[in-house]
Amino acid sequence: MRQNLMYKAYVWLITTIRDNGPMTLSDINVLWIKDKVNEGVGLDRSKFFRYRNEIEEIFHVTIEYNNKHGYYIKNPEIFRKDSIENWMLSTLAVNYAIGECTDIKDRIGVENIPSSERFLKDIVQVMKKNQILHISYQAYGRDRVSHYSVQPYFLKLYHQRWYLIGPSDSRPVITLALDRMKRVRNTGLEFLMDSSLTVTDYLKDCYGVMKDETLEVEDILIRAFGTEVNYLRDLPLHGSQREVKQGEDWADFRFKLRPSWDFIGKLMERGDRLKVLEPESVVAKIWTKHAESVKLYKENEESGEV
């Protein structure tokens, strides 16, 4: 319980200073006392300094002091990063906000992450020890359960599913969805891993969680139309996305990645709001998929299914 209250305090301090700009300790205290979570108890200087140090240690958010303006977030860019610290902070902030609204819980909808509890904690603990996992796994469309010995290099959350990525006994690198795992066992066997490897670097030229080495990294130019322009500005499709040209009702964005079918599917999902300009190889993939969709609907129409 005490730890839960401390994390609430961390999140409260970070979001309050972030959202209000530079603040004196007196300014912070006024809002602190008003918040019902703190039950009207003030925030003394020693407790604030302790929380500030713990916040930097846990979330890597640095709260600095300026003699003229007060306390501020020194590294606000961390809130824009695709990092575990930012994800933790956002998740905790949402949990605490909703936790205080149990009286209207039937009016708030959330998405389920089916694999988040069953195996996630155990896998994280084994990753910390650099030990090999034995995994029983049933992929979609397969009647039989497969068995893999996997070195758990990375975990990645993508489209509400957790994925484990790492070398296995059957292939150089395997990607497994946690919700398709039937059994996970720690073998106790250790492996060596380069400590400089990160999941961000591994997937930097990929869209999603699959790294297809047969695909070359391409320089891809896409034109967005109408409201899609602002959508891409606010929610980039990929870390390499750069806006390179603007028109009256359109903008061009450049990407550098492997044009996987996941990426092609994402572009097609946006319908007539996105158009691939180059390279021709990616344009051809889009044409092929659209042609297959048209053919499917024509077949349904001819058979009377539509």
Image: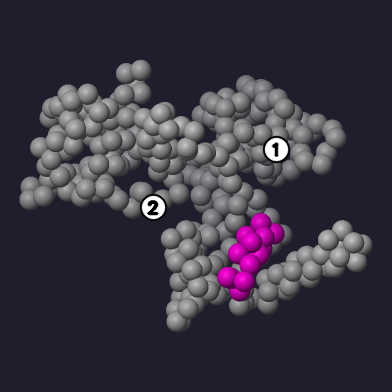
* Residue under the image location 54 percent in, 55 percent down: 204
Mark earlier in primary sequence (1, 2): 2
Q: Is residue 68 left or right of residue 190?
A: left
- Locate residue 12: give its quadrant: top left
Q: Is residue 23 magenta?
A: no
* Residue under the image location 65 percent in, 50 percent down: 210
* Residue under the image location 17 percent in, 24 percent down: 41
* Residue 102 place in picture, x, y as percent: 42, 28
Circle 1 or circle 2, nearest the eye: 2
Q: Which mark is residue 125?
A: none
Q: What colour scheme was applied to this rendering of the protein?
A: one colour
- Amino acid beneath label 2: Arg
Q: Quadrant of the N terminus?
A: top left
- In magenta, the rendered stretch is 258-275
Return the residue nearer the eye: 271 or 7.
271
Q: Is residue 92 left or right of residue 42?
A: right
Instruction: Name the residue furthest right.
Output: 303
- Locate residue 207: give its quadrant: bottom right
* Residue 217 place in picture, x, y as percent: 61, 65
Question: Are there few (<14), some (14-19), or many (20+) residues within 10 Å of tag 2?
Answer: few
Tell me if residue 294 comes above or below residue 125 in the rendering.
Answer: below
Instruction: Name the residue furthest top.
Output: 1
- Amino acid beneath label 1: Ser
Q: Secondary structure at mark 2?
A: helix
Return the residue nearer the eye: 174 or 240.
240
On the image, numbered disc 2 is attached to which residue?
A: 80
Return the residue nearer the eye: 228 or 263.
228
* Residue 20 place in picture, x, y as percent: 22, 48
Q: Which mark is residue 168?
A: 1
